[in-house]
Amino acid sequence: MSSILQQLLNGVILGSVYALLALGYTMVYGIIKLINFAHGDVYMLGAYFGYFFINVLHLNFFIALVLAMAVSAGVGVVIEFVAYRPLRQSPRIAVLISALGVSFLLENGMSYFFGSDKRAFPQAIATVQYHFGQLQISNIQLLIIGTAVVLMLGLTLIVQKTKMGRAMRAVSADQEAAILMGINVNRTISFTFAIGSALAAAGGVLIGLYYNNIDPLMGMTPGIKAFVAAVLGGIGIIPGAALGGWLIGILETLTQAIGLSDYKDAVVYGILIVILLWKPTGILGKNGREKV
Amino acid sequence: MTTILKTHDLSIAFGGVIAVDQVNIEAHDNELIGLIGPNGAGKTTLFNLLTGVYQPTSGTVAMFDGQRLSEMNGLPPHRRAQQGMTRTFQNIRLFTSRTVLENVLIAMTISSPAQTVGALFRTPKFYQQETDKKQRALALLAMFDMANVADELACNLPYGQQRRLEIVRALATKPKILFLDEPAAGMNPQETQALTELIQQVQTQFKMTIILIEHDMNLVMAISQRVYVLEYGKVLASGTPSEIQQHPAVIKAYLGEEI
Amino acid sequence: MDRTHLKYTLSWAGLVVMLFVLIAVMTIFDVIGQYGMTTLVLIGINLIAAVGLNLVIGMSGQFSLGHAGFMAVGAYATALIASAIPNIGGFILSLVIGMSVSGVVALLVGIPTLRLRGDYLAIATLGVAEIIRIVIINLKITRGPAGIFGIPNFVNWQVIFGISVIVIALVVNFVRSTTGQAIIAVRDNEIAAASLGINTTKYKVIAFVIGAMLAALAGGLRASFIQSVSPQDYTFMQSITILIIVVLGGIGSMSGTVVTAIILGVLDVILQNFGPLRMVIYAVVLIVVMIFRPKGLLGTSELSLKKLLFDTGDSHDNHSKNA
């Protein structure tokens, strides 16, 4: 029993990182219907920025985290501006290929300039283990969950309460109408990329701290998993991304716990397919109907 | 007079809103029926129920299959089209990237034999069938004065012509019942006049049942043999155009109550 | 068959023969070397897979991200069967079985997902391809992550050339058939197509299944040619490689697919000289091409001999609207 609880806990921690990434996917998909394949690589960049701020500039972990988020937000905005914005009126698939191009560029550019080897992420915070009965949790794990929750609450606040958040919701509901209402669509999309990229970077820094190492390809698999999480929860729906992220994290650790670790990704994809057959718009998705 | 289409207590609810509420209508062969009512009365929703785009919450749709009325509940739109129901759309839905002729040819898919193997190996028979089909499509277009634009892209046609093409395309499926959803919407008086003649031409030449949603009362009253009036998802009245024009409930619905 | 049709057919055939002779001469005088030959064969194999994917993406308008999964099915079918029956009959049997299995998998995935509108096929195929790969890694018979070696080779450039030509001709003819036209109609306006009696799901599934079978064919040929298979050859990246060929060529343009498969194959050879910078350059090329030619090199048009050779008009433009 306690080992199951422990696995659930581990799943929630991994899931928190997926959730942070999935939020970016879901917001971008919601607003410009793009599967942003470069998103996982922004997460990787975030980890590298964190590494740089801690290792080279010797900054405090939290300052490094915030700075990494800020710089990655800027990178996200630049990516959108250079690679996606010129394609606003083009077929969706063209933007998708451009996103793949950006993804290759970030992965291979980082490998080229900084080497493709794994780097040890600095132990900026000493690990302390806490015990609650049979359960074991480290301060870093708590930090991951805590940061994820705080950031998600912050995001909810931004989306629900601020003018920019309202603009985001308006553009994602109907871009044309949003323009007519005087909303600056370009700025809103930039803002969406900034927020999404910042969240991804936070995920990257946290995972670097947790696993102790980073490499230029670290974003590939989590990127796809986070996209799956976003779809699972209901793409375009913010709480859905969080739900999907945690669900996938938990599923993954549970399949490992029952001895199917070789098949853990297959199980995740299998469950995704089953859920989509049962509810095509994802767990929290609403059924949209095309007007005839 | 054979009854070709009949609904029984047909209803659909979207969440709490009952868009079509226990509607009972019937149509006979070779009849032209007008369906009128205020905006939001459920006319297009009724069309969607009849053609299978939506499945009803309760009630049935039945169509004459040659011997008797058979129920169509659960059949998707393409199956109903294969049995002889086809339609046009309020917001025109042409295959815009294809030519006028291709739009009609595609509509002939269900009535022409599949010749995939012939097509793969380009047999002489394939070319023969292609030529035959093309000639039939062109003949149909010529009947509605559209042969001269056969090679134009559908999206380049003027609005009135696009509506016309949608009707011709529907006819290419050889329907028994044709549903026209606001065919005169957005047309100027000349275009509406041309459309009126077109619909009458279709009915006399093709001998089919036509059910028509329209807001242009002159058009509806001029060509319909019977009219159903829908309000709040219910049938408010039915009868010949002159009966409808004198029906107190209809006058009330359209003009408001006199004080 | 009337005279003009005969004329087009003969001129296409002439072009194909010329190309064949050109390659043959290059081999005889050893202009392109062993490496060039290998590249040529791999271009042909990618081409077959890409033509299949273009049928799915371009013609039926559905979005598949799992082409590598179907290639893997074909590759492993050939690896297992052709190794067990090491003769040409066994090889052909392996291709047939690979294509059939792949088609059945596509049917099982396609029927439920293609009822829906939206990017569902993309997500489902992404998942299915990964599942196929993970199963291959973990099964005994497929020899896990190491893969299978020593597969007998029945493939040379002539075989690939012939199969590519046949596949392209059949697919182009298929697109012009009633079935092909119905598939395009569903892409253009699904609701209208249904109202005309076209079973939209059926036609989307047909396109998807054929696409998957061609992927398996490509996979089988590849396994035999390089004489080995391993799960790393059929990752998400392989799906992306094929997707890029289709999109860069112009979605829905078969000639675009052919031209791009060749260009990218050659580009790959040139980029080998750049060492580690290779992928960086490739990435930049990808972004730049998309920004300046968002509809791909040929858009939806086709290179047309009809226009090129028989047009008497003022059009010297070598592509015509896809008719």
Image (tube, coloured by chain):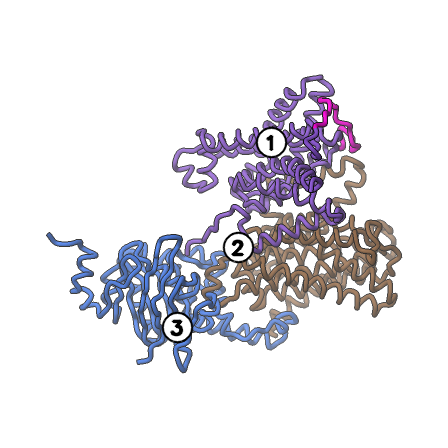
Chain colours: A purple, B blue, C brown
Could you say which disc has been placed on residue A224 in the image? Answer: none
Splitting the image into 4 quarters, where does residue B48 fall?
A: bottom left
- Crowding around mark 2 (Cα neighbors within 10 Å: few <14, some 14 to 19, many 20+) is some
- Of residue A5 and residue B247, the one placed in the foreground of this image is A5
Tell me the CA gap for discs 3 and 1: 57 Å
Q: Is residue A137 above or below residue C205?
A: above
Q: Are marks 2 and 1 on the same chain?
A: no
**Residue reaching furthest left?**
B259
At numbered mark 2, what does the secondary structure look like: helix, strand or loop?
Answer: loop
Any part of residue C254 in sight: yes
| Residue hosting label 3 | B62
Amino acid bearing label 2: Arg
Q: Which residues are magenta?
A: A111-130
Q: Which mark is residue A148?
A: 1
Judge depth for marks 3 and 1 and give the one in front: 1
Amino acid on which disc 1 is placed: Ala
Which residue shows up at 61% across the image and 60% down it? C110
Residue C317 seen in this snapshot: no
Front position in the image: C128 or C30 = C128
The C terminus of chain A sits in image quarter: bottom left
Q: Position of residue C302 (x, y in %)?
A: 61, 56
Whole-percent x and y of residue C286?
66, 41
Question: From mark 2 to mark 1, how far is it between C-alphas?
Answer: 33 Å
- Residue B145 shown left or right of residue A58 in the figure: left
- What residue did someone put label 2 on? C117
As rendered, which of C78 and A214 lies closer to the eye? A214
- If the image is split into quadrants, where does the N terminus of chain A sit? top right
Residue B80 is a magenta residue: no
Q: Is residue C295 above or below residue B199?
A: above
